[in-house]
Image (cartoon, grey):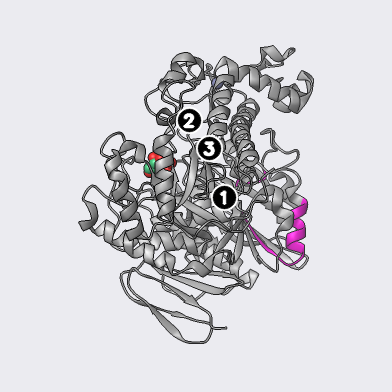
Amino acid sequence: MPSAAPHDRLPLAFGGDYNPEQWPQEVWQEDVRLMREAGVTMVSLGIFAWSRIEPRPGTYDWEWLDQVIGMLHEAGIAVDLATPTVVPPAWFYRAHPEALPVTREGVRLAFGSRGAICHSDPDYRAAAATITTRLAERYGSHPAVVLWHVHNEYGAPVLTCYCDTCAAAFRVWLRERYGSTDKLNDAWGAAFWGQLYGDWDEITPPRATPTVVNPAQQLDYQRFADAAARANFTAERDILHRLSPGVPVTTNFMVAPSQCQGIDYWAWGREVDLVTNDHYLITDGRRTHVNLALAADLTRSVAGGGPWLLLEQSTSGVNWQPHNPAKAPGQMARNSLGHMARGSEGAMFFQWRQSRHGAEKFHSAMLPHGGTGTRVWREVADLGRRVAGLADLRGTRTRGDVAMVWSWESWWAQDLEWRPSQDLDARERLDAFYEALYDRHLTVDFVAPSALSSVDPERHPLLVVPQLYSAPAGVAADLERYVSRGGTLLVSFFSGIVDEHDAVHTGPYPGPLRDVLGLTVEEFDPLLPGETVTVRTADGGTYTADLWSEYVVPGDDCQTVAAFADGRTAGHPALTRHPLGEGTAWYLATRLTGADLAAVVDLALADAGITPADLPRDVELVVREGESGVFRFAVNHTETEVKVLLPDGSRAAVPAGGVEVFRDRR
Ligand code: GLA
Ligand code: ZN
C-alpha cells in the first residue's frame, strides 16, 4: 500500500528532468545559477544514470551525484530523485542477455536505446532492487530529496515481452487466477477452435500465430504484463518507503494520448503516493489544447480528484513525431497553467538543458541550444515567476462539472481483431465526446466502471459513456441507481457488449445496459469507409452519421428522438431517450462528430439542467477551490481579447493567447 506520506515538503513545482551526467562538471555551476534565474524549484534527477552511478558491477561512483545534489540543495532547489531502472548498464545485459524483451515474433530486442526490459526476469528484478536500495541508503534522508521518481514511463516504449520466462510467469499468474485448467477453459471459451488445455504447461503467451489468437488469452496476457510491471514498481516503492520514510514515491504516467495503452492507470493510481503525468502535444491536425485538457482531467481522476503533478511536457517542439512544430509565443504558458487549472501542483518539463548528443538533441528544453538569448528562455523565466505567484494554489481541488466513463481494460478488449468494423475506436469516441463537453466549457471527472456506484447525480448531473464495449455485469445496477435518482445518462453505441473475458453478455445487446436504456439492439450494420447515413429528428433537423448503424428495438417507454432516414437501417431509431425514475437515459446508435455530436450532447445537458457558460470557443474557465480560496483560471486560446464573467457580476479581460487567474474576494 502507498504510504500516507504528506506531500508537504514538495514545493509548487517548476523545473524539469536534469541530466548532469551528460555534461562536464563546469556546466553544473551554470546550470544551478540559471535554474535560480528561471525560478526552478525542483528537478527530476538521475533517471537514466545507472551506468554512471554503477560503472562496473558492484562499483559505485557517488561523488558526482553527491556534488550535484549538494549544489542543488544549497541553491534551494528540491530533488525528485529517480531510480534509474529503466536503463540497466551494458555490463548487465552482457551478463544477462535474457533480460532483454522478446517480441511476439520471437525477436529478442537489443541494448542501445532504453527501456529494453523483460519485467519477469529475475536478474533484472534483483539488480533493480539492489540499485534502488543503494540509492535509498545514500540519499533517503537527504533534505533535498522530496520525491522519489521510480523508473520512467512504465509501458513505453515496450511493456509486453513474450519470452520463456514470461511464459512461465504467465502460467503462475493464471493458476492463481483460475485454480484449475477447467476454469480457465471456461473463462477463455477454449472449446472454440479446439483450444482446450489439460495442463498448465501447454499454455503459451499470445505469440505470433497463423491467425487470430483467442481474445480472452490476449486480454489475460495484457493484464499479466501490466501486473508484472506494476509488481516491479511496487517492489521499488516498498524499498523506498522502508529506507526513506516520509518521502512520497511516484512514477511518471502518460495517461493520454496513447503511447502507454498497456497500462491500466486506474490500478496504478492506487499504488503511487502522488500521481504524476507526462504530456506532449500531438500534432495530428486536431486542437492540441483539447487533448491537453483531457489528459489533465484524466490524470486528476486517476489521482482520485486530488492534486497531482505534471512531471514532463515540452517548452517548444518535440523530436519524435514526423513533423515537430515549435510552440507559438505564449503557448507554453497556456499549456502549463492549463494543467495547473486542472489540478497539477506545478509545471515540469523534459528537460532542463537541451542535449548535444543522443536521440533527443532536437527536442526543446528549458535552456535551449541557443542559450539565454532566446524566446524560449525568456518565456521559461516568465513562467517561473508566474508559477511562484500561485503558491497558495497548493492543495486546492479542481471542480468537475460532468462525469465520463473510461476503461483501459475495455479499450484493450475493443482493440483486438475481428470486430464488426475495424474502424471502431474507443479512444476516438472518448476524444469526440470530451471535445463536445470542452466546447461547452465543462470540466470532466472521469470514472472507472468499477467506481460507478460513487457517481452522485447531484454532483455530476450528466454521465457520459462514450464507448464501453467491455462492461462488467455490475455496471447495470450502478447506472440504474444513478438515473433513477435523477441523473442524465448518455450512452454511445457498442457499449455493454462483452464481459471481462470478451464473452458476449447473454441475451440481446446491449447486455447489462438493456434495462437502463429501455431498448435492445437486434443487429449491427457497420457502414463502409466513406459511407454516410442521414439521421432525422422529430422536428425535421438532420445529422450526418458514419461508421455505424444498427437495428434498435425501443421498449414501450423509450422515446425515439431521431431515426435513420436512409441507408439499410432507415426507419429505425438512431437516438433514444428513456425516462427512468427521476432521471433519463439517452442512447446514440451511430457515430456523429462535430456540430452534430454537440447537438446531441446539448439535448442531454438540457435534461441534466446544465447551462454552459457563455464564452467564446477555445476559452477555458476552470475552477480550483480549497481552504486558500477560489481560483478561476481563464485560458484564452484565441487570437483576440475576451471578457469573462466573474461571480461578482464584473467582466474581466483575458488577453489574446493569455491566461488570467482570478481569485474570489472573501
Ligand atoms: C518521454 C520521456 C522523456 C523524453 C520525452 C521526450 O516522456 O519520459 O525521457 O524522452 O518523452 O518528449
Ligand atoms: Zn520476458
- The amino acid beneath tag 2 is Val
User: Is 526 placed left or right of 450 in the picture?
Assistant: left
Residue at image coords 46%, 28%: 60
Instruction: Give the mark, 2 or 1, whose residue is nearer the N terminus.
Output: 2
Q: Secondary structure beneath disc 1?
A: loop
Residue 246 horizontal/vertical position (percent): 63, 49
User: Which residues fall within the magenta stretch?
Assistant: 477-496
- The amino acid beneath tag 1 is Val
- Point out which mark residue 158 bears: 2
Magenta stretch contains residue 79: no
Instruction: Give the mark, 3 or 1, whose residue is nearer the N terminus.
Output: 3
Closer to us: 513 or 148: 148
Q: Quadrant of the N terminus?
A: top right
Q: Are marks 2 and 1 in contact (CB under 8 Å)?
A: no
Q: Quadrant of the C terminus?
A: bottom right
Instruction: Specify the quadrant of the image occupied by residue 626.
Output: bottom right
Q: Are marks 3 and 2 in contact (CB under 8 Å)?
A: no
- The amino acid beneath tag 3 is Arg
Closer to us: 306 or 259: 306
Instruction: Specify the quadrant of the image occupied by residue 494.
Output: top right
Residue at image coords 76%, 57%: 480
Closer to us: 412 or 374: 374
Report the image quarter containing ligand 1: top left
- Point out which mark residue 275 bears: 1
Residue underneath mark 3:
138
Q: Secondary structure beneath disc 3?
A: helix
